[in-house]
Amino acid sequence: MRVLLTGAQGFAGRYVSRELEEHGHTLFKFLHHEPESPDKNIFTGDLKDQATLTKIVHDLKPDACIHLAGIALVPLGWENPHRIFEVNTLGTIHLLEAFRHAHKEARILIITSSEVYGREPRETPLKEDAAMRPSNLYAMSKVAADRSALLYAERYNMPIMTARPQNHIGPGQSSHFVTTSFAKQLLAIANGEGDPVLKVGNLENKRNFLDVRDVARAYRLLIENGTPGEAYNIASHHIVSIKHIVEQLCELTDIDPLIEIDPERYRPTDNPPILDAEKIKDHIKWIPEIPLFDSLKTLVNHLR
């Protein structure tokens, strides 16, 4: 298939690009900034620019689109609410409108977030029809994008799906995220750079972590064989504490640091619900394959 990928320069975007190309798809990238070297398969623009998006879709007429572009930082929702909705929600609607007017037949996968379900634990794993209880403005922007995409699928008979992934990790992720932050600090200690102190937030919080390569594979399988009009959870049932992540990284780096709570990193305890991922397993035979320890080892080796 000829696949248009937005957010191709981002953390997950680089892995999705590789996954698509390795499986024989022709990739076209939509970037926010000009590439270092000219490439006929790269288009640049802004999600706020409806006219440019429509022209690109009209001229290219891709078979499919995976929409990854957006802002992934939860705190930014509180710091700049206007921007988080402008990019995550309105940007998604602009893309959907571009396809509605220029190429309705394309298969579209809109990536949102497991944050749409909120962060309060629930009694049973959540299926895709569970109530959405966003607990921050970032999550609210993703709820609006997700619901809008599925409404477009229904109202305009467009082959649109949404994916709601949980936390994914790997080389190339920003230091704003815990695994990269901890790994970089521990390797700096191993290299004799500063005091042997690891600054952390709330180690009691629990999260579901997936390897970004598993997530990229899920996106590829969904754009190939997912069912239009459906939402898909992308998750595992393996929930771990942030403390466990620290212990694993200390083992991998052979460092036993002093743990120091950093007030700026500290967040109140919130243990998100477990997601039911049976639908994606049933529809496209996807399950996560890479163990957490292997993901962390890959991250540490890359940073070394």
Image (cartoon, grey):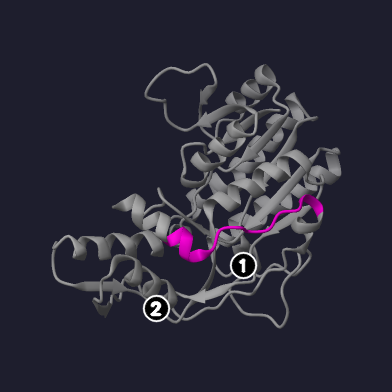
What residue span does the magenta drawing correspond to?
Answer: 283-296
Query: What residue is shown at x 44% (from left), y 55% (from top)?
Result: 80
Q: Quadrant of residue 243?
A: bottom left
Q: Which residue is labeled 1 in the image? A: 134
Image spot of residue 11 (x, y percent): 46, 46
The residue lying toward the viewer, choosing from 63 and 93, is 63
> Horizontal placement of 5 versus 303: left or right?
right
Up-down relation of residue 44 to residue 263 (above or below): above
The residue lying toward the viewer, choosing from 72 and 98, is 72
Report the number of discs. 2
Residue type at the position of mark 1: Pro
Query: What residue is shown at x 72% (from left), y 68% (from top)?
Result: 276
Query: What residue is shown at x 72% (from left), y 71% (from top)?
Result: 126
Q: Which residue is labeled 2 in the image? A: 202
Q: Is residue 175 visible?
A: no
User: How far separated are the C-alphas under marks 2 and 1?
Assistant: 21 Å
Return the disc, 2 or 1, that comes first in the chain's sequence. 1
Q: Secondary structure at mark 2?
A: loop
